[in-house]
Structure formats: C-alpha cells, structure tokens
Amino acid sequence: MNFDFALILAQLPAILSGLRLTVLIWVASTFGGLLLGFLVATVRQFGPGWAGALLRVVVEILRGTPFLVQIFLLYFGGPAIGLRLDPIPAGLIGLTVYGAAYFSEIFRAGFRAIPPGHVEAAECVGLTRRQIVLRILLPEMTMLVLPQCVNMTILLVKETAVLSIITVPEMTMVIGAIGSQQYAFVEAMFLLALFYWLLVEICGWLGRFSERRLSKFRFS
Amino acid sequence: MSMRLFELMLWAAGNTLFLSIVSIAIGLAIGLVICAARLSPSAALRWPAVAFISFFRGVPLLVQLLLIYNLLPVLGLMVPSTVAALIGLSLCTAAYQAENLRGGFASVPRGLMEAADMVGLNAWQQFRRIRAPIALRLTLPALVNEAILILKASSLVSVVGVIELTRMAQNLSASTYKPLLFYAVAGGLYLAMNWTLAGAGSLTERLVRTGRA
C-alpha cells in the first residue's frame, strides 16, 4: 500500500473550483436558511393559526426525513410536476429549505427564552408587533441562539457533500472524480476529509470567537 | 403502487432499521471506550480519542463511508458493502455518543462521589454502581436523538450499494419511472420510524425525570 497524493494535487485548479462551489453553496444556504428560518419561526409564533399549523407540518417532515431523500424528491421527482431544475439550483434550494427547518426551531426556542416582561414592556411603550420582533426579540435572541446556529452551520457544510450525488460539481464530486481517474480514490477521500475537517474547524473557531465578542450583549 | 412493490419498500425500511439499531449499539460500546480514553489522565490515551472525535464529527458521513468502503480492500479486507456501511455508521455515531457520554459523566453530582468515598466504595465499584448508571440515565434522551439522526444518516449507505430504504426507492423509481411516488413513500416510512422513535424518546425522558428508568 503506497499513497501518492501528488497524483491528486496535480489537479489543483479543478480542486479549487470544487472547493469554491462548496463554500459558495454553504454560505448561500446558511444565509438563506437563517432568513427563511427566522421568517418561519416568526409566522409560527405571531402569525395566523392556520399558517402556523401548516408550517409545523412542513418543518416536521423536513426534520424527520433524510436530506438525501429530500434532494432526490426535488431533483428527480420535481419534473413529474413540471419542476425542472439544474443540479446547482436544486441543491441550493434543497439545502436552504432543509437548513431553514432546523434554524426555525432554533429561533422558536430563542423566542420562548426571552422573558415575557421584555415584550410586555415594549407593548406598553407602544411598539408595533413588527418593531417588537426586529428591535427587541431579534437582538436579544442573537446571543442566545448563536451557539446552536454555529452547530447548524457546521452541519450544513457537511450536508453539501450529499449534493455530489445529484452531480453538483462541488468538492466531493470533483475530488472523487479525480481520484477515480487517477486510480487514487483512497488518497482523494483522505484529502477531501482533510478539507472538510479544516472548514468545520474554521467555522467552529469563528463561532467561538463571535460568541466571545458578543457575550457583552447577553441580557441574562 | 402495487402491494408487491410496497412490500419491497417495507422490507427495505426493515433493513434501514436493522442497520441503524446495530450501529447505534456498536457505537455505544465504542463510544464508552472513547469516552473513557477522552477522560483519562494519560495524554497518550486522551489525544487519540480527541483526534477520533474531531475526525468523525468534522468530516461528512458520506466521505467517511466512501473512504472506509474503498480503504478496506486496500488494507486487504474484502467485506460485503453492508459490513463497510456498518463500520462507517458505527464509528461516526461512536464519536457523537462519546461526547454525549462525556457530558453525562460531567453532570454526575460531586457530592454523590464524595458520599461513595465515605462509605468506602473503591474506584471500580464507584464507576459501576454510581457513575455509570447515572451518566447513562442522563444521556438516554441524547441517545434517542442520536438514534433518529443515524436512522436518517443511514440513507447515505445507499451510495456504497447497500439496499436499504433510500436505495430501494432509487431502484424502484428507475424501473417504474415514478420517482415522485417512491421517494415520497420512502420519506413517509422514514417519518413513521422517526416519530415512533421520538415517541419512545419522550417516554424515556418522562421516566428519567420521574426516576423510574
């Protein structure tokens, strides 16, 4: 058994393009998921009852089924109802919606953790519901939900690897293909593992850093 | 979907359940060992445990599975893909369970251990009679969560050719040209299994809270 990583590293430009797409999809789906998740949590908390009930079912389904099945349903099942998507948009939409389901639960727990007195006080001074959400709940919640949001962000970078199965040319697909062509699949997978591990460690480090920086805003 | 095809899906769901239960059980055993190494005073034991946990939690399961599936033949081990899948799932969940257990052991009240010292229990007795039962009870809810996660994650072993629920849905979609139907049914079966597990989870949590587990 002799490992030859040079065979794979010779394809550096392709590897970098895969890495770039992984990071792009990761960042886009994290921000999209945070935004959509916050919206879902807000509607479930303050919106009309029927919308809350509907969203609850959707979130339960998204959290109870494997991401791989969801992405298959979207990418292969979509055309049957006229929804024809290329791999990259399908992957982006799938991952954003999947992330939003988890983020919305984190935000909901955050809403519940804020002392009701704060909301009552805001109501007393005449803030509208929208102002209460954006000016009181969101800022106060940020510190509370940050650690779990970081965890979810880490989960999302790992889920991007699944998109290789529907041929999104991200890191797993690109490095896997190079590994097969060069007959060095094990080396390729080791290198890939190293890349993901680095991304996850960087993300965890950034999370701890921002937690420290934001800790002065903690209200409790 | 004909009855015959639905039976095939049910059989595959059974396989998913089998893979999940076996890997959760093996993962718990390995996780206990890793956790013990992680908490050991000796650095020679602690650092490999830290590296193990960091690797298996930091790398996507799909990459782990592809790595193990392709590495085993290189190492001269020709095993069926189900075995490779079980190794991958077990090692991955072991890393998470080791961390859960570490949390459990950390929350055992110090006073209890002092009391155990006072009545003259030795270190092994303290571990077997007091620390381990309490830590396991504290980590039961996390174990149920982990089981749900693994049940979903097991869909990835379809990639290395194991015929479980997701792979069966894939095969039947390809042969009947009805992907929407089969993936929806697969999703429904995953939901049913997860909700059952979650129900069992809240039951154990209640039993733990009232001190009956």
Image (spheres, coloured by chain):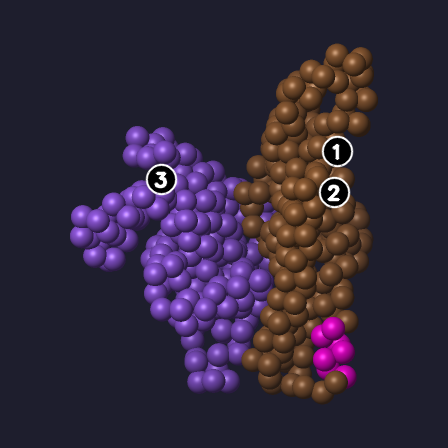
Element at label 3: helix
Residue range in magenta is B4-10
Q: Tell me the quadrant of the picture where the N terminus of chain B can be found.
A: bottom right
Amino acid at pointer 3? Met
Q: Give the mark toward the camera: 2 or 1.
A: 2
Q: Is residue B25 shown to the viewer in this render? A: yes
Q: Answer yes or no: do the residues labelled 3 and 1 have beta carbons within 8 Å?
A: no
Instruction: Give the residue number, with chain letter if any, for mark 1.
Output: B133
Sequence-wise, which precedes: disc 2 or disc 1? 1
Q: Colour of chain B?
A: brown
Left or right position of B182 against B11: left
Q: CA distance from mark 2 to mark 3?
A: 35 Å
User: Same chain, marks 3 and 1?
Assistant: no
Image position of A28 with respect to A2: above or below: below
For image coordinates 69% across by 55% down, the residue present is: B200
**Residue at mark 1: chain:** B
Q: Tell me the quadrant of the picture where the C terminus of chain B can be found.
A: top right
**Residue at mark 3: chain:** A
Which chain comes out purple in the rendered image? A
Instruction: Give the residue number, with chain letter if any, for mark 2.
Output: B213
Element at label 1: helix
- How many other residues sit within 10 Å of disc 1, few (<14), some (14-19) or many (≥20)? some
Left or right position of A154 against B193: left
Q: For residue A166, which numbered disc appears in the image?
A: none
Instruction: Give the residue number, with chain letter if any, for mark 3.
Output: A143
> Where does the image place residue A88, in percent across and percent down from the top left?
42, 67
User: Same chain, marks 2 and 1?
Assistant: yes
Q: Give the mark toward the camera: 3 or 1.
A: 1
